[in-house]
Structure formats: structure tokens, C-alpha cells
Amino acid sequence: MGTTQLETVPEPKYWHLKTVLSEALDSEFAVGEILPNERDLAARFGVARATLRQALEQLELEGRLQRRRGVGTTVAPPRVGVAVAPARHSWPGAAGDDWQPVGCDVSDTVPSVVARLLETAAGDRVHIVRRSRVTQDRPLAAESLYVPAAVIPGSAQFDLLTGPARAHAVLQELQSLELEGQDRTVELGSARAEDAKQLDRLPGAPVLVVTTRYVSGGRTTAVAVSTYRADTCRLTFGESDAVAFLAG
Amino acid sequence: MGTTQLETVPEPKYWHLKTVLSEALDSEFAVGEILPNERDLAARFGVARATLRQALEQLELEGRLQRRRGVGTTVAPPRVGVAVAPARHSWPGAAGDDWQPVGCDVSDTVPSVVARLLETAAGDRVHIVRRSRVTQDRPLAAESLYVPAAVIPGSAQFDLLTGPARAHAVLQELQSLELEGQDRTVELGSARAEDAKQLDRLPGAPVLVVTTRYVSGGRTTAVAVSTYRADTCRLTFGESDAVAFLAG
DNA sequence: AAGTGGTCTAGACCACGGT
DNA sequence: CCGTGGTCTAGACCACTTG
């Protein structure tokens, strides 16, 4: 069934292929099931492997498929609804928060977009708390939280701590400040090598980047950059969390 | 410069290329400037065109480049901050809303995910209002708003109207209902053919799909599915709109 | 008509996971 | 070790925009 039907506006093969595969996934496959390998699939549809891969890539982008090198291609479960904006504003690390502290560093250079939000100059010491969000053994997101050392009184003592303990200490100090507000942006990005490893994906994998600005004392006190796996996550916002549990 | 340096973990060529190009964009190119064409660039870097394209695709995904068939590749301006969640909840089509009504249809079949949210059965009449969001002559988003005919009293008369006028009429009727709440989800998708045309992109282009649920009278009264160009948009949420005007 | 990006091919080799 | 998906090549043709 290669190029049987030609229409007035010839549809690209990979696009047609994607449609066919998508319908097949709906009707003939169960979640978790393994598809034939790419070479067999390409032969079956009478296209080059690169063309088939173009279709598979889009389906993976839409969260329909999951591909793993050395293993194969499987039918993905519906996207997980992930609550991003809690009902009440709260600092990261507050009780009931789904994140696990991983580690903490101090640096005097931060991404320029973060420095602009924090209004820090080059050379200012900034705590970088790294956290990870996991559900059902699947990594969902990786986060870097930037807190200028200047906003935390006793931060010099933290140098004695390492790893999660140090992360905890920084988060602890935040809770005592009064949180006046917060806002967020969401945009598409591609995973940096470091995040990719934490998310169990290859570098460059599509991610949803959530940048949260925490306001206290009239200024931006902390900035969190969270990268969510775009293939498996659906971010949810709003007062009712009910929607977070709806299947896709 | 082909495979000169081999590291312990050999970096893919396209990844390295992307890094090199990204730095060149920062330092040597101005927004709007036209890059050399793909064949020349590939030759200059000593790689196949497909490999170069893989790097360009990622840069376009990240909003750094803009490619147009028949024209060329240009350096993209920073992403536009787009306010998605207004300070106070309001119905679509309320005063001060950035959307332009395009048209309106009635259908008895809606996407299954929408039907589930609206709790409509197959065969129920649903108004589908199509709107478009534009800034500075650039299309940002396309939207389909689904409103069951049952929730709008005098909707039978709307059959006399067409196009934007009919869309207006449906939106008008919504304003009289009391809006009790709303929530949203954001996920990655690829543009359907129809949306792609409206967004001035090719089918399959990456989009951020925002699904908004409007609650009134204790049930979901309307559902809006808005698809934003992922390459050019940064969605903003939160009480202060200040962040919407920060450059990326 | 010329030049651009978009699609497609038929190969090849590599990195990784499981056996 | 084998089989998987990931990377890469060197071509070809097509769809689109512009002069």
C-alpha cells in the first residue's frame, strides 16, 4: 500500500502513516504492548526506515508511543496529570510537596534568564537546590531552585552539609519567610544532558519548562526551573484538582 | 572538524552542531537575520544535510530559529509571553479578551476527550466557536470552544447567523451565566492540518495545547481547546502580569 | 526560472539492553 | 552475542516563494 491513492493535495507519507498507526493503536493494541521493530514496520508499509521513524517520532511526541534503545517501541499509557499550581501559594519544600531533594550546590554563575529575574549580579553567591519529582517509579520532572545566599541568613553554615541534607536545610530556611506571591511561565524546551539523565531520556528530548518566580519582601526571592517530560506529562492548573485525575 | 575529538562518551554530531550554532546565534547574528541555506551550512560543517537539519529542527523547537519553505532560515525573536490565566475568572469572549471570533458551527460529534469533560452523549448538539489569537500580525493560537446547545437557551435562532457574528452570539449568551470556576491543563501536541494553516505552520508543528474547563451550575458548561505555537509562545500564569513582558 | 526548505530513499555503522 | 532504536550519509525529487 505504498503510493496507491494520490489526492489533489498529496499528503506526506509520514503524515498518512502517522494517521494509520494512530488508528491501529486505538483499536488493535493494548497499553504496554510491544510494536514490531522499525525495520519490519517500514517494510510492511513499503517505506524507508527514516520515513517510518518520522511518523513514530510524532507519535512519541504526542505521548502515544514510548521508544527505548535496545528494547523496542511500546504503546504508552495516557499522560499523567501533574498538579503544578497548588491551591494556596507555598514555598517549595513545604509540607505535602511532591518533590524529593537530590542535592544542593553553591555557584556564582546562574543562567542569564534566572539572574535577570533574581536581579543578581555576576559573582553573587546563589544556592542551587536540585529536586526530582517521581510517581510510580517513573521520573516526571527535574528541578533547579535558585536562591541567592543573601536572602538566607545562616547559609554559610550549610557548607558543612552535603546532598539531600543540604538541600533540606536551604528549603527549611525559606519556609520562615513570608511568601507574597508567585507566578509561572510554561514553554517548550529540549532536555539538557544532565536533566535528560535524570528523566531517563536522551539529551534533546522535548520537555515542558516551568519557570516559577517566588516573591517575598517586594522582590523576587527565588526562582525554580522545572523541566517536565513532555511525552508523559500533562500539567494541570486551577483551583480544583479533580481534573488532574482524569485520564487523557 | 568532522570527528576530530572523540570523548569518553562520543557526543552525536547534530548535538555538537546545535551547540556551535546556538553560540554563533548569540554572538554573531541579529534577530531577523537570514542564515546561509541548508546545503551551504552542511558543506561548511562537513556533515550531511540531514544531520544539519536535525540540529536546525531542535533550534527551531527551542524558538531560536524560524524556517520557512521557499524563503529561508532566520533568527527568531525571543518568545512572546502570552497571558493564559486572567487575574479574575471570566468567560471566553468577555471584555478585554485578546481573542478574535472566526466562526461557529454546530456538530453532534466532538473529540472524545471533550465529550468526557462536558458529559455529553453522542448525538448531543454542541456549538463549536472558533477563535484566533494574534499579536503584531503574528498568529499565536487557534481555539475551539465547545458549548453544548443545552446550556444556551435561545440557541436555535443562531442558525440564521454565520461566521463571526454567530460566534459572537454564542459568546454573548455565555456571559449571562454565573461562572463558578475554571481549571486548565497544558500539554504538548502537534498541530492538526486545520490549526496548522491558521497558525501559519506546517501540519505536525509542535504546539502547546491548553484545555480550559469552565464550571457553572455545578457542572462543566464549556470546554476550550487552545493550541499555541510552541516555537514562538511562552505561556504565563499568575496574579502579576509583569512577567509576561519580560524578554526571554 | 531559480532558490529555498520539506520529503524520501537505501543503505551503513554505533550505542545500548538483554541473553 | 543478538536485536533494538539512534545516528549518519549522499544522493533525489517535490512544494513553495520570490524575482
Image (cartoon, coloured by chain):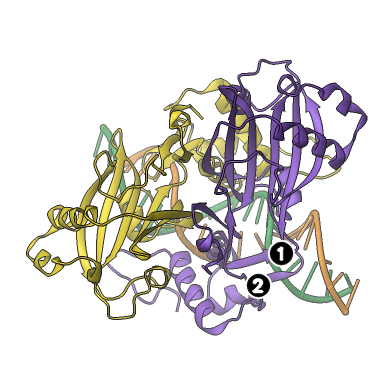
Chain colours: A yellow, B purple, C green, D orange
Q: Which mark is residue B189?
A: none
**Residue A10 spot, x, y in % from top left:** 79, 45
Residue at the (75%, 50%) spot, across then down:
B198
Residue type highlighted by circle 1: Arg
Residue A241 visible to the viewer: yes
Tag 2 or tag 1, which sits nearer the N-term? 1
Residue type highlighted by circle 2: Thr
Residue at the (77%, 21%) spot, across then down:
B153
Please tell me which residue lies in front, D2 or A199.
A199
**Residue A2 spot, x, y in % from top left:** 71, 37
The residue carrying mark 1 is B68
Q: Are marks 1 and 2 in contact (CB under 8 Å)?
A: yes
**Residue A230 spot, x, y in % from top left:** 46, 46
Q: The residue tagged with tag 2: helix, strand or loop? A: strand
Q: The residue tagged with tag 1: helix, strand or loop? A: strand
The answer to whether tags 1 and 2 share a subunit is: yes
The residue carrying mark 2 is B74
Quarter of the image for residue A6 reads top right
